[in-house]
Amino acid sequence: MAAAAWAQTAANVSAPAATDIAPPAPACVAQEPIADWDAAARLIAGTSSAGYAESFSDEQKAAWADYARTAAADWGRLKRRYVDRIAAWRGKHLAKAPATAVVFYPFSGPDATNPLAFFPAAREYIMVGLEPAGCIPAHADAFTPEYWPALRQGWRLAADVGFFKTDDMKHELTESSAGGVLPVLLFLIARAGNSIVDVAQTGITPSGQVVALAEGETAPAVEVRGVAIRFKDAQRGERTLRYFAANLQNSRLARRPGTTKYLESLPVSTTLVKSASYLMHRKFFSRIRGIVLAKSTVLIQDDSGVPYHHFDPASWDVHLFGTYDKPIELFREWMQEDLQAAYSSGDGVQPLDFGISYKWHPGESNLMVAVRRGK
């Protein structure tokens, strides 16, 4: 899943615009208070309408019931074909990898599924995407029958291909009644078996501090806005997912020194990159590429992440999985001949039994695990 309206096929994925364009304003910009965030998340996830059903009209109840059936089928398909296979792969290939408390996921969109599946033991997940956090309805009457198909449109193709299409996100997650990425994050976190403790609007200040933002608060000034979701399960206790809406292009980071300072101050972390439109192959994303390489103890990515030639064998142990021939046609200019040669040699290349990223059919995908030496 990495980037968020899910792409219909790998062949028609479009890259984020390389120009310095801010994302559009979200459909809702201020989250009203929610008394029970877990009940709201379970409603969004289609697992329970407790806490809302008594206030729903018959039409609302019928619309939610239809949505819940479809959501269960979609999630079940994704879990069988993708999430469960990642769990099995993780147990076999990441058991001895250095563990960190923090997982960093740039170019993520609202894809909470992958970091939770690959790194379930982390305490904090930091995700950055272009789309605004948005909000969910605070009152039962706002969950109209039209809300549910709009919400499902934001994540439904995850069950088929596992990544978000940037162009679709602009319409489906920022201009529709679904209202930003927060509903999708709640859906995916809850469906992964977690209960939601609370949700807080946050921002990064010009000094690089992360602060909570009260409803309607205008101070302190923040460079980027986001959301912090605290959640828990019985096995691993409480964890936090932080999502920030920020453009990571060099020119945008230069105008947001606090955001750059925050990213550079992150603790040593595990980093995940997938379906990233090959942005870190481009010179105008060199700043975030440098941060990823400097801060990562372990980096898991597909070929759309950091180019292979940046991994000096003196500093990194690189393990290759799956197969690599060339990128899909849309990204053909980012062909990596050195990576192709490494795969063609067969030296240490291991199979990958699930599809991931733009070549999402099993048997076509690639994955790289880079572990910093000495860790």
Image (cartoon, rainbow, N blue to C red):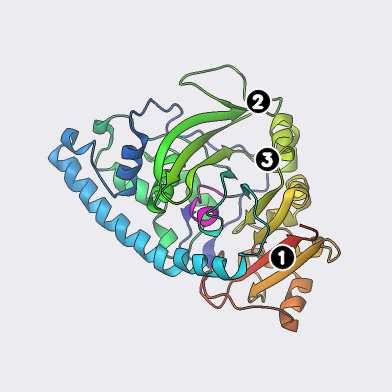
Quarter of image, res 335: bottom right
> Is 109 covered by the magenta stretch?
yes
Q: In this view, does 97 lie to the left or right of 150?
A: right
Q: What stretch is highlighted in magenta?
A: 108-116
Name the element at disc 3: loop
Quarter of image, res 186: top left
Dot 3, how many residues are within 10 Å of its Cα: few (below 14), some (14-19), or many (20+)?
few
The image shows residue 104 at horizontal and vertical percentages of 63, 48
Label 1 is placed on what type of residue?
Glu
> Is 79 covered by the magenta stretch?
no
For the point 48% across and 59% down, the residue is 7
Residue under circle 3? 20
The image shows residue 337 at horizontal and vertical percentages of 77, 73
Mark 3 and mark 2: span between their CA atoms? 21 Å
Name the element at disc 1: helix
Label 2 is placed on what type of residue?
Thr
Q: In this view, does 237 lie to the left or right of 220?
A: left
Kindly tell me whether residue 328 is visible in this rendering.
no
The image shows residue 218 at horizontal and vertical percentages of 55, 17
Label 3 is placed on what type of residue?
Asp
The image shows residue 110 at horizontal and vertical percentages of 50, 47
For the point 52% across and 56% down, the residue is 114
Residue under circle 1? 333
For the point 32% across and 44% down, the residue is 42
Q: Which mark's residue is nearer the viewer, 3 or 2?
A: 2
Q: Does residue 324 lie above or below 143 as drawn?
A: below
Residue under circle 2? 205
Dot 1, how many residues are within 10 Å of its Cα: few (below 14), some (14-19), or many (20+)?
few
